[in-house]
Image (cartoon, rainbow, N blue to C red):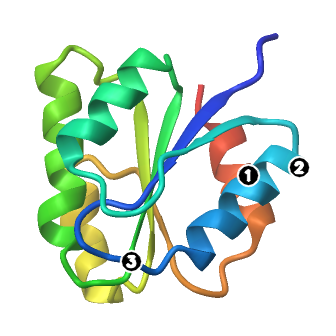
Amino acid sequence: MAKKRILIAKPGLDGHDRGAKYVARALKDAGYEVIYTGIRQTPEAIVSTAIQEDVDFIGLSLLSGAHNELFPRVVELLDNKGAEDIIVFGGGVIPIDDFDYLKSKGVKAIFTPGAQIKDIIDFIELQN
């Protein structure tokens, strides 16, 4: 079976990428193909790269507080481009009160600081 391809992206103006880089490296070390797009990406650029790279997942990382706008925008753009099969998950400093909203908008899972890489891998492996 082909390796799962995962795009890790930092949408918006958030410039802190230590967590995203850590997750990207850990997933690569676990055997996944990982593309890290760097900081300050627009939702449009993230979706374009995800489609071009034929990824299975997009992992979004955000600390700035704009997750309720930017994460759903990525899902919306994927749907508009016919790429709704790409699974979106998020991470960063996201209040638990926002989890239900984000999930209602198509974000499949949220991982906050302190989440174990094993939990992210388990989530990825449970998606078919």
Closer to us: mark 3 or mark 1? Answer: 3
Disc 2 and disc 1 in contact, CB within 8 angstroms = no
Residue lying at 68% horizontally and 63% vertically, measured from the top left: 23
Q: Secondary structure at mark 2?
A: helix
Residue 14 falls left or right of residue 65: right
Q: Secondary structure at mark 3?
A: loop
**Where is residue 111 shown, x and y percent of the image?**
53, 71
In the picture of the structure, the residue carrying the numbered disc 2 is 29
Quadrant location of the C terminus in the rendered image: top right
If you read the primary sequence from the N terminus, does the residue marked by circle 2 or circle 1 appear first? 2
Q: Is the residue marked by circle 1 packed among few (<14), some (14-19), or many (20+) residues within 10 Å? A: few
Q: Amino acid at mark 3?
A: Gly
Q: Amino acid at mark 1?
A: Asp
Look at the picture and state if 118 lies above or below 45.
below
On residue 25, which mark appears? none
Disc 3 and disc 1 in contact, CB within 8 angstroms = no
In the picture of the structure, the residue carrying the numbered disc 1 is 122
> Residue 115, can we see it?
yes
Q: Amino acid at mark 2?
A: Asp
